[in-house]
Every structure is written in structure tokens, then in C-alpha cells.
Image (cartoon, helix red, strand yellow):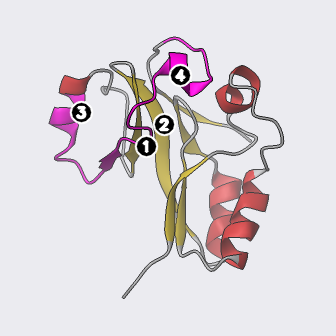
Amino acid sequence: MKLKIDLHCHTSFDLIEEKVCGRKGLIHPKELIDAAIAKKFDAISITHHGILFHNEPIERYAKSKGLLLIPGVESYIDQKHILLINFSSIKNIHRYEDLCRAKNDSGLIVAPHHSRSPSNFGCQHKQGQPQEVSRS
């Protein structure tokens, strides 16, 4: 069985992507879900910078549309952008060594921009600790 999944999505709820990186025109999470359904995706992961996306109304909306919404975050770890997909918590993941310990979890670790760092990513922000937040 083949599944169509996008593990690296940003929306207008990603404050760093929109405000710091200057990427305008990001869509609302519900619009992203509708677009994913229209393109016959089975699942997506909303991977905002530094924030593990959790929003119950959006999760309910995705579920009502038949789309699996996988928890995710784009973290900045040891000067690299790293996607942390399907982790129950990201509170203790701040360095490469933490990734090595965390990889035994049910999560997936992806390096989405193999050669990018803040200086060549077009986005200037300081390394910070990932946060788990809910935004309505």
C-alpha cells in the first residue's frame, strides 16, 4: 500500500516562517488541509519552526476530512534545521546528542535542508529551545 504524505508543511501560524523569514502568503492550516485533500494526500505534518504544532480544532478538522495530521516541528539543532516527526515530546531535544538518544522513540528525524544554516537559509534567528504550544 502506498501512502502520499508531506512531512514538511508551514502555515500562517508559523510566526518565524512568516515574520522573521519574510515568507508572505502562507495559508491557514484549514486551507492547507483542504489543499492536501484535493491533491489526495493521506497525511501531512505541519512543521513550524521551533513549535510542536498542536491545535485541537485543526486536528478535528483534519480528522473530519479523512486526513491524518502527524505532529511535527522544524527545530534548529547544532546549527542545522531538523524535522522531528511524531514525537510525543520535544522538551529534551536541544543538541545532536539528544537526537541520538531520542531516535529510539516512535519519532522520525529528517534533515530537510542538508546544507542550509541560518546564514544561507534566508532566515536569521537564534538557536533556541523547541517549545510545545497550542495556538487557536
Q: Amino acid at mark 1?
A: Pro
Classify residue 116 by image quadrant: top left
Q: Which residue is mark 2?
A: 74
Depth check: give the residue in front, 40 or 55: 40
Q: Which residue is mark 1?
A: 112
Mark 4–mark 1 Cα distance, whole angstroms, equals 14 Å
Seen as rendered, the residue at the extreme top is 126
Mark 2–mark 3 Cα distance, whole angstroms, equals 13 Å
Give the structural element (helix, strand or loop) at label 3: helix
Mark 2: give few (<14), some (14-19) or many (20+) Cα within 10 Å: many
Q: Are marks 1 and 2 in contact (CB under 8 Å)?
A: yes
Q: Report whether 87 appears left or right of 43.
A: left
Q: Quadrant of the C terminus?
A: top right
Mark 4: give few (<14), some (14-19) or many (20+) Cα within 10 Å: few
Mark 1–mark 2 Cα distance, whole angstroms, equals 9 Å
Q: Earlier in the sequence, mark 2 or mark 3?
A: 2
Q: Amino acid at mark 3?
A: Leu
Q: Earlier in the sequence, mark 3 or mark 4?
A: 3
Mark 2–mark 4 Cα distance, whole angstroms, equals 16 Å
**Which label number is shown at residue 120?**
4
Q: Which residue is mark 3?
A: 99
| Residue shown at the point (62%, 24%) measured from the top left | 122
Counting from the top left corner in percent of width and height, residue 70 is at 48, 58
Q: Amino acid at mark 2?
A: Glu
| Residue shown at the point (52%, 16%) measured from the top left | 119
Mark 1–mark 3 Cα distance, whole angstroms, equals 15 Å
Seen as rendered, the residue at the extreme right is 25
Depth check: give the residue in front, 72 or 23: 23
Q: Earlier in the sequence, mark 1 or mark 3?
A: 3
Give the structural element (helix, strand or loop) at label 4: helix
Highlighted magenta segment, given as a residue range: 98-126
* Mark nearer the viewer, 1 or 2: 1
